[in-house]
Image (cartoon, rainbow, N blue to C red):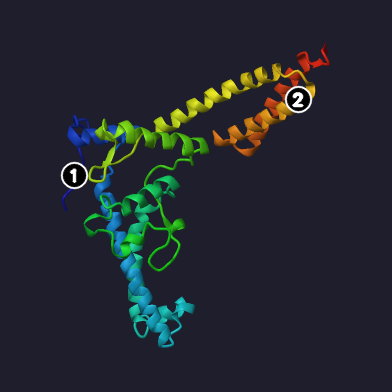
Amino acid sequence: MAAAAYPSQDSAKRQLHGYHRMARMMGKSDELAIFRKFNDVNMLSLLSLQAEILELRDDFYIICEGDEELGRDFSTSMLHLLQEKNDSGKNQYQALELIRDKIQQYIAQLSELHQPRDDYLASLRDWLKDRKGGYSKGIFKTKEAFIWEKKDFRGENTEHDLITVARPRGERDLFTKYVICPLVGLFHRIWGRRNLNKRYVIDEESGYVEYSEEKIDRAGTIISTIVASLLPAAAMSALFFINSLQERIHAMLGITAVFAILLAVMSNAKRIEIFTATATFAAVEAVFIGSTSVYFGGHTT
């Protein structure tokens, strides 16, 4: 019997090259273990699996309806279906096995994914309905077109069933969503599409672009910070020119309410955080009112 071969000390110490050297380096540093995801073919694989599962599910339901018409109660007992898998339940069991094989592949690729954000889902739906986008050349006109709609071709709600490969981001605050984003759209229509940086283009045929999330959020943060820093000074200035104590108190109530509303609209602060900030702001106003002079009938107090 031949003796087992072991690597010599010289071979263990030999200088590594190419992939061997790269693998050793990656093995010592997780941060350097970087790989391509091949997003295009990865997405194509997911889309094809999704279409296959859609068709297999329809075939399965047709078989189930036929079994129910014949009085086979497999829908109430999986054990009964298992017992009849080689007899009366053969077709339904085989269809279920086909779905199981495909769904395992599908879920394995989707297990780490998250629900899409509403604005991106709306953009995808708009693209699918665009004659220069997904609606062109007759694609996505079969039942597969309903996959991303609010209801599929059977009328079932799909909102809870959609996921995205993007890293999860929190929902935008109302100010960014309804003020900053429309301004970005206006910028694109007036100037951006004529002087477009190609790195923002995600679909050349339809002209769809995606501007930097970080820059949009940063713009919202900068404006919110400026407003937050100016509001206390503006409030103090307004209260200073009100002579009546009663009118100052009424103005203070209004200013405090505006502060709370702006805080809710221009940030993603929690209720307790809004309450704390508003109470602090109101306390500052109260101290200001108590420390400045007011006039009653021409007399200073």
**Left or right of 16 on screen, residue 245:** right
- Determine which residue is flagged by label 2: 247
Give me the disc on residue 92: none
- Determine which residue is flagged by label 1: 5
Amino acid at the residue labelled 1: Ala
Percent from the top left, x then y, of residue 175?
51, 35
Q: Quadrant of residue 36?
A: top left
Q: Dot 1: what SS?
A: loop
Amino acid at the residue labelled 2: Glu
**Foreground mark, 1 or 2?**
2
Q: Quadrant of residue 241?
A: top right
The residue that appears at 72% across and 24% down in the rendered structure is: 283
Looking at this view, is 273 or 187 the one in front? 187
The residue that appears at 18% across and 34% down in the rendered structure is: 18
Characterize the local packing of mark 2: few (<14), some (14-19) or many (20 or more) Cα atoms within 10 angstroms: few
Disc 1/disc 2 C-alpha distance (Å): 96 Å
The quadrant of the image that shows the C terminus is top right
Looking at this view, is 233 or 106 the one in front? 233
